Image: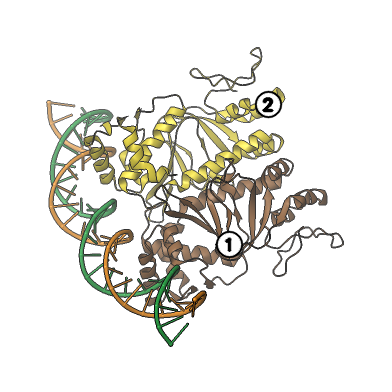
Chain colours: A brown, B yellow, C green, D orange
Amino acid sequence: MLTRTPGRVPPPSVAADDGDELHFCSTCAFSAACLERGYDKGRLAELHVLVEHTPPIREGEHIFREGDEFNAIAAIRAGTVKTYVTDLEGREQVQGFFLPGEVIGLNAISQSRYPCNAVALETVLLCRFSFPKIATLATRMPGLQQKLFELLSEDIGKASRLAGDFTADERMAAFLLLLSRRYAERGLSPTRFRLTMARTDIANYLRLAAETVSRVLKRFQADGLILVERREVELLDVPALQAIAASVLRN
Amino acid sequence: MLTRTPGRVPPPSVAADDGDELHFCSTCAFSAACLERGYDKGRLAELHVLVEHTPPIREGEHIFREGDEFNAIAAIRAGTVKTYVTDLEGREQVQGFFLPGEVIGLNAISQSRYPCNAVALETVLLCRFSFPKIATLATRMPGLQQKLFELLSEDIGKASRLAGDFTADERMAAFLLLLSRRYAERGLSPTRFRLTMARTDIANYLRLAAETVSRVLKRFQADGLILVERREVELLDVPALQAIAASVLRN
DNA sequence: GGGCTGCCTTGACTTAAGTCAACCGGGAGT
DNA sequence: ACTCCCGGTTGACTTAAGTCAAGGCAGCCC
């Protein structure tokens, strides 16, 4: 069952009666979304029973694999998840990285099977939402339906972001700034963070060679834009990075 | 109001009482989707009043522009639509082409404004679905909600399709085969069709130079894969094209 | 400690595709 | 009929980034 996790809790716009046992974890996007929209307790309780908090999933373990039966979407409570597909020649193609507070499995909604693999890059905790059930509930909760529409729509934007013919510099700067923004949204430092994924994963995700990632990071550091120490990164000149990434983050 | 358009009509799984005035155009994805799922007449009527058939939109005219208030999604009844954004330097970036039976405006669902421009490449006819209304209706029609989820989810897949580091040949072959498939879905010839968009638009969409598009098409023709005559195309060797496009259309 | 192993970096070379510039050819308007 | 113009094509050159090969460095196990 849901329990309030320690740490930053977004203030619910509707105060929950603290006497009962309805508590929502601070990083659960759905629970938060519902709280924000001020649903009555009966409906929160309905959502509540759909949520399953998973035990820890360790680094390298899969959350789902391509072709598995689609039965749930999941909000990440802790850790980083990488999604990827395997192409015809057996090479891995990284599709995305998911941080705490983000939702995986959405792109499976139109199919009966997951279209990609999801693997933990660090120990991961999830809130699972069994799918047919949450869709049924959404028919009675317009706010939840709207939230699902929004999450799907956002994913369309994310998916097309790297589709342009961008330079290695543009891709790398955009990648760093988007990570920064996502960490900031979680209340973490937007200028100092850890790259939880390997260089080869970053390269694969950005459709660059690993060598290129290495060279670009080195040059960014030489130009005083960033500071890299193994997987720790500090953004020193955000405006300059924004100028470089402008065409990716666009308009 | 909706009238049955001439031409191919998908057989509804629930026979409509032909005596009343509820007729749905054959290319309207939503109406068809609802018919397929066998909703009762009362609900079809509800959907019915949301649909607006637009007058013809001529080549070069805009359907919506980036920043316009989002108020509807639209299924295309006839013509081709190009969506694009304008980057910081004022250059156009083509996001997609939409054929009859396809739905535009979905990527605006999470925002209050359209995130891109939509322009007619040929005379276009639309079925418009006023948005807040159709979402409200979806809360009472699980099949419609599911259809919206599916359309959104498919768009995620489409958006990420060209994101890889593919060669010009792979992109071009995949483009031709995807067009072919889309025409086939409409009951048109999958091997002979017209490119309704300019070479420069194709190039921009595929993130190639127009010169490269020209050269690749020429080489495909020299190799006996296709036959190009101005904007008319015939696919001569689909298996060979599939082999080239395999890594784009993947797995 | 010694030697793996995996991840990362560095340098030298190659190539796919972009850019630049010129030209072609059909359709529209005078 | 003439010209203009735009979309498309062609050829010569350039370049960003990939590939190949080698080497470094941290952590792990024996």
Q: Marks 1 and 2, how far apart in space?
A: 40 Å
Tell me if residue B60 can be seen. no
Residue A182, percent from left and from top: 56, 63
Residue B26, percent from left and from top: 53, 23
Residue A99 numbered mark, or none = 1
Q: Quadrant of the C terminus of chain B?
A: top left
Nearest to the observer: residue B170 or residue A43: B170
Q: Is residue B94 above or below residue A183?
A: above
Where disc 2 sits, the SS reads loop
Report the residue at 58% width, 31% height from top. B30
Disc 1 residue crowd, few under 14, some 14–19, many 20+, Cα 10 Å: many
Where disc 1 sits, the SS reads loop
Nearest to the observer: residue C22 or residue B103: B103
Tell me if residue B224 can be seen. yes
Q: Is residue A82 above or below residue B205?
A: below
Type of residue at label 2? Tyr
Question: Disc 2 marks which residue?
Answer: B39
Instruction: Output the chain of dot 1.
Output: A
Q: Do circles 1 and 2 both sit on a common chain? A: no
Nearest to the observer: residue B225 or residue B4: B225
Residue C4, percent from left and from top: 41, 73
Report the residue at 55% width, 58% height from top. A119
Report the residue at 41% width, 56% height from top. B88
Mark closer to the observer (1, 2): 1
Residue ranking furthest to the top: B19
Residue B70, percent from left and from top: 57, 43
| The image quarter in which residue B188 lies | top left
Instruction: Output the chain of dot 2.
Output: B
Disc 2 residue crowd, few under 14, some 14–19, many 20+, Cα 10 Å: some
